[in-house]
Amino acid sequence: MSPCPPFQDLNALVDGALPREEELALRRHLDDCPACRGWVNGMDALKQAVGRAYGGNVASPALQRAVRASLPKRRHWWWAGVVAGPFLLASGAFL
Ligand SMILES: [Zn+2]
């Protein structure tokens, strides 16, 4: 099994923002890694719930890229995405 990817990559997968080759590689990892698969499934469910709560509006792709670019690349920051994700998605609904 390949090493677990940084949370930014998992976020990008949930947002559908990965290039096709990276998405396929990450999905192969998810097949073998219940921890990452569970994280992605949880974020996807959260994203859908926030989208429903705000009428389907989510942060623009440009805002999502800017937020991802501003986040540190270190793996122990994965929790920041869990905490900040819903707020970022909700704030995007008002932009
Ligand atoms: Zn993993």
Image (tube, rainbow, N blue to C red):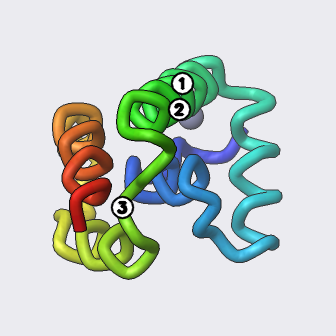
Q: Secondary structure at mark 1?
A: helix
Spatial separation of the CA atoms under disc 2 and disc 3: 13 Å
User: Residue 76 location, x and y as percent?
Assistant: 21, 41
Amino acid type assigned to the residue bearing label 1 in the image: Ala
Sooner in the amino-acid sequence: mark 1 or mark 3:
1
User: Mark 3 near ligand 1 (CB under 8 Å)?
Assistant: no
- Where residue 34 sits, quadrant-wise, is top right
Q: Are marks 2 and 3 in contact (CB under 8 Å)?
A: no
Residue under label 1:
45
Q: Residue at x 71, y 35 (%)?
A: 30
Q: Are marks 1 and 3 in contact (CB under 8 Å)?
A: no
Amino acid type assigned to the residue bearing label 3 in the image: Ala
Quadrant of the drawing holding the N terminus? top right
Spatial separation of the CA atoms under disc 1 and disc 3: 16 Å
Which of 59/83 is in front?
A: 59
Disc number placed over residue 59 in the picture, else none: 3
User: Residue 56 location, x and y as percent?
Assistant: 50, 44
Spatial separation of the CA atoms under disc 1 and disc 2: 5 Å
Which of 22/91 is in front?
A: 91
User: Residue 49 location, x and y as percent?
Assistant: 46, 25
Q: Are marks 1 and 2 in contact (CB under 8 Å)?
A: yes
Amino acid type assigned to the residue bearing label 2 in the image: Gln
Disc number placed over residue 48 in the picture, else none: 2
Q: Residues within 10 Å of mark 1 (few under 14, many from 20)?
A: few
Q: Residue at x 79, y 72 (%)?
A: 20
